[in-house]
Amino acid sequence: MTSRTMLGKWFERRRGQVSGIEGIFVAFGFAIAPYAFSQAIAMVGWRETWRILAVVVGVGMSGVGWLLFRDNPEICGLRMDGEKSPTANSVLVLDSDHRKEENGISDSLWGYTRGQALRTLAFWAVTLAFASQALSVTGITFNIVSIGAEMGIAEADIVRIFIPNAMVSTAVGFVIGLMCDRMRLQFIFMLMMAAQAVGIAAVANLNRPEMWAVAIVGLGISSGCFGTLTTVVLPRFFGRASARRELNL
């Protein structure tokens, strides 16, 4: 979530393209994780696997964040998409309804406050769609062994579903990233929700061989859409900063 939020604050015109590239790694990582964890647990046990993850995430990723993450391009003397920041100490007065231009520079650092966002229908439509995808697919992913057991499918067989799922979600995430810069996001949300419904229905019938392909395609498409949209939607709809702030650039 942190990495996706950061990308949304650093790119505007290329936000969809960059999120699509990011989605290649995120979608593949999420999709392959259950299989990788299952193999690690089989080799060293769940306690040791848990300790290894704690070191990798707690020490490794915290170090990467400290070294590379910056809150926004303005504090680095840059503008979004890599453009240079103005050298003059101009003050930009930001308003959620109007992007003010001073010294010939169009400001892209604008935003709704939390209260303003909560009063919009778009916020709740986006949030509920994301919540539906996150809750249902996470539930399926981390209970897939139990789901398979109820249908008489062995653990080694059921977790293999995530390998082709990773391939589908990775490819879809990249394509959706390119599409986000060129079309209305509402249609991509509709695609995500439709694919999610198909994938969930197929998972409930994995004891039928033909449903495996349907589940892989449905959940793969919805996961690919989800990874990209979570980067693109919030900064596009609601901006990057609190409303009516003053920033010394």
Image: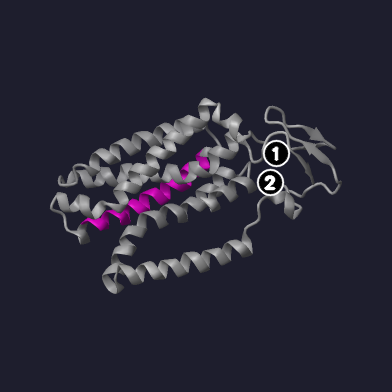
Q: Which residues are magenta?
A: 158-179
Q: Between marks 1 and 2, how big is the CA–CA gap?
A: 8 Å
In front here: 84 or 33? 33
Asked whether the beta carbons under mark 1 and mark 2 sit within 8 Å of each other, the answer is yes
Which residue appears at 27% of the width and 44% of the height? Answer: 215
Way the structure is coloured? one colour
Which corner quadrant of the image does residue 225 belong to? top left
- Amino acid on which the number 2 mark rests in the picture: Met
- The image shows residue 53, relative to residue 248, as above or below, that is below
Lateral position of residue 180 relative to residue 133, left or right: right
Which corner quadrant of the image does residue 237 belong to? top right
Counting residues from the start of the chain, the first of labels 1 and 2 encountered is 2
In front here: 185 or 231? 231
Which residue appears at 77% of the width and 32% of the height? Answer: 100
Residue 80 disc label = 2
Q: Residue furthest bottom?
A: 44
Find out whether residue 163 is within the magenta segment.
yes
Percent of width and height locating residue 168: 36, 49
**Mark 2 neighbour class, 10 Å CA radius: few under 14, some 14 to 19, many 20 or more:** many
Percent of width and height locating residue 232: 54, 41
Find out whether residue 246 is within the magenta segment.
no
Residue 108 disc label = 1
- Amino acid on which the number 1 mark rests in the picture: Ser
Percent of width and height locating residue 153: 16, 54
Q: Secondary structure at mark 2?
A: helix
Which residue appears at 26% of the width and 58% of the height? Answer: 160
Q: Secondary structure at mark 1?
A: loop
Percent of width and height locating residue 185: 50, 33
